[in-house]
Image (spheres, helix red, strand yellow):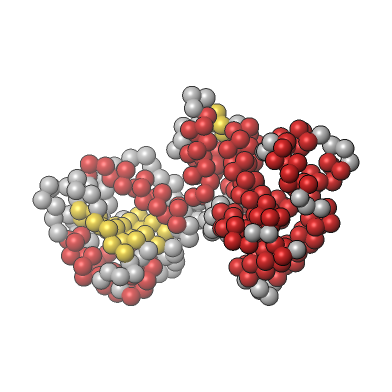
Amino acid sequence: MNTPMSTRAAKAKALYAIVSPDRFLRLDALARLLEELGDQADALGPARFDGDSTEAAVVLDEVRTPSLLGARRVVIVHDADDFISANRAVLERYCARPAECGTLILVCQSMPRTTRLYKIINECGEVRTLEALKKPQVVPWITARARSTHGKRMGPAAAELLREQLGDSPGVLDAELAKLATYAGDRAEIVAADVEAITGCHREENVFAVTDALMAGNVAAALGAWEQVLATDRAAPGRALGGLAWGVRRLLEARREWEAGGSLTDLSKRMFTSPDVLRRRLERVSTAKLETQQRDLLDADVAVKTGAATLESVIERFIVTHCAR
């Protein structure tokens, strides 16, 4: 991410653009900016507009209207990409001579540096660009976020485990960090055991709810449980498919170890469940059936990645097929 934010702006500017392809990062940056503006902004709060449905004249009239309380009028245009495209010339003229009594904030997914509007805003105000997190950035982001937002230390090992469990979506990760901070209570650090207790258990419960419904032949329940798996990372549904395959693989490994004389007590601890529940699961499904499910999920993943099928179609086919079996 570039354009690091200061903790307190010296003076509110007339123009800001918050740019990021990630919705969570956009909204988080906006919240921090509003916090920076503090008592410089109108106490009645900002006026908010949806860029998909508002008109430039309405927005600019609002930002040009002086506040009755003497502070700055703050006007925010959310999802402003289409709004900018439809009103580029009008916005360029306004941004060249912005109102002194107000602050206009454009929140959008992209704003190329080569455009005239970007250059004008960057000269007269500020463009805050937050790039989507790349894989090597995710763990450092988690540890920094745990400290800065949730007041907890978190080592790289615990952060990596959280990333493995939930993927790379900042919004999903931040929501789980909030739960983990509450779970840690008075302790100053979130450790790997906390992640396993909260996140690992939740994820495995969702995944094994799908396999339990398959074993019971309940198509409706399996589809509903799949929706819960998918909800862990709607920004990247392919990871949910990978999570389901991971769950089937874990169950297959447990079945093989149990057949070889492994302890149900030890296995159940690794599977975040009780020995009795794990025994029922393993007794209801054969090694051969789990191997077939694993192979079918691999084929489904290939079909989705090559464009031969949609995620929805392959999962529905997988569930219906294995419920019938």
* Percent of width and height locating residue 270: 72, 37
* Extreme residue toward the left, this view: 68
| Position of the C terminus by quadrant | bottom right
Query: For the point 84% across and 46% down, which residue is it?
Result: 256
241 left or right of 264? left
* Extreme residue toward the top, this view: 186
Compared with 96, 182 (above or below) is above
Query: For the point 40% across and 52% down, which residue is it?
Result: 27
Image quarter of residue 153: top right
* Percent of width and height locating residue 254: 79, 44
Image quarter of residue 39: top left
* Percent of width and height locating residue 6: 38, 42
Q: In the rendered image, is residue 158 in sight?
A: no
Query: For the point 31% across and 47% down, which residue is it?
Result: 34
Image quarter of residue 93: bottom left
10 left or right of 115? left
User: Disc count in the image?
Assistant: 0
Nearer-the-camera pick, 89 or 151: 151
